[in-house]
Image: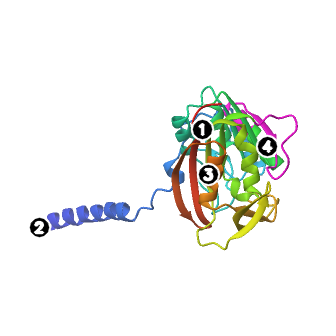
Amino acid sequence: MDVLKKFFSSFSGKFANRASRVLFAPPKTETTAHATSEVEIPGVDNLPDDELEQLNKLLPWAAFVLDRNGRKFGAAYSSTKRNLPQAMPDPRIVELDRRIPLRDLTVFEVGCFEGIHTAALAMRAKHVLACDSRIENVVKTIVRCAMYGTSAHIFRWNAEEDLPIGVSLDCDVLHHVGVLYHLTDPVGHLKTLLPRVRRAVMLDTQIAPEDAKVLTYESGGRTYRYHRYQEAGRKEPFAGMLDHAKWMFKSDLLAQLSEGGFGSIDVAKFQMQRNGPRIRIYATRDSDR
């Protein structure tokens, strides 16, 4: 009898311990879910740990990806922002390539940041142009693309300024993610770029809340509505270059695309975020130019 009690006591203890590990084990984080990258980084995968550590200290990285060994290439911006590995490739680029196969096309990326999207685009497209308003981001993008073994024409251009001299922005596809809502003249910006796009646009941006206080400004001789958003300026890597930005209303943004000759406009995603609504649009011309 004592033997049976000891057996069941031991069995119950083991079961309870196992159950507690199952019930109370910490949930998988995004970091553990992406322990390694499916995309090779030839310039990083074989680096010794100390050399990779040195690379990550050389530049003011604010985002990171993982190599095939699960090591960080880049760095988190903070404990709460860009603190998880970025997807490579980004699902938006995968979807863009599915809708408009990029293999034989030229893509212009506005706002390359640190080159994670740039490298993914360069793996798919025939040619990639990429710009950013901050010179440190230009350098980081050059390094990131080099480490992935890809190439792109990367240059500094602040979209608040006149067009760059000596660089043609003509393209088949415009990749425009996370930039429009940082600008003081988003309408003028679109009117400048859209005529240079031969086939399609992927535009991902915050927009004005429908109940926002309506202000107006003039661009190109016409008056447009906007919602004012305070910006931190040049010193903050995730902010616009000036003291404020003008967020467009959804209907006005769609109207600009339509007026720009994009007859097929698909609002693929609309969601409420902490700062306000965000929209993702895939727009194509009725016929190639």
Is residue 44 visible from the viewing direction of this image?
A: no
> Main SS of the magenta segment?
loop
Q: Position of residue 177 (x, y in %)?
A: 65, 49
Tag 2 residue: 1
Tag 1 residue: 285
Tag 4 residue: 138
* In contact (CB < 8 Å): disc 1 and disc 3: no
Q: Depth check: give the residue in front, 169 or 73.
A: 169
Please give the name of the residue rendered at 54% of the width and 44% of the height, measured from the top-left corner.
91
Q: Residue furthest left?
A: 1
* In contact (CB < 8 Å): disc 1 and disc 4: no
Q: Closer to the observer: label 2 or label 1?
A: 1
Please give the name of the residue rendered at 31% of the width and 62% of the height, measured from the top-left corner.
19
Q: Write down the region rendered in magenta.
A: 143-169
Label 3 sits on a secondary structure element that is strand
Q: Quadrant of the N terminus?
A: bottom left
Q: Which amino acid lies under the numbered mark 3 shown in the image of this protein? A: Asp
Q: CA distance from mark 3 to mark 4?
A: 21 Å
Q: Quadrant of the C terminus?
A: top right
Q: Which amino acid lies under the numbered mark 2 shown in the image of this protein? A: Met
Q: Closer to the observer: label 2 or label 4?
A: 4
Q: Position of residue 56 (x, y in %)?
A: 73, 46
Q: Closer to the observer: label 3 or label 4?
A: 3
Q: Which amino acid lies under the numbered mark 1 shown in the image of this protein? A: Arg
Q: Residues within 10 Å of mark 1 (few under 14, many from 20)?
A: some
**Tag 4 or tag 3, which sits nearer the N-term?**
4
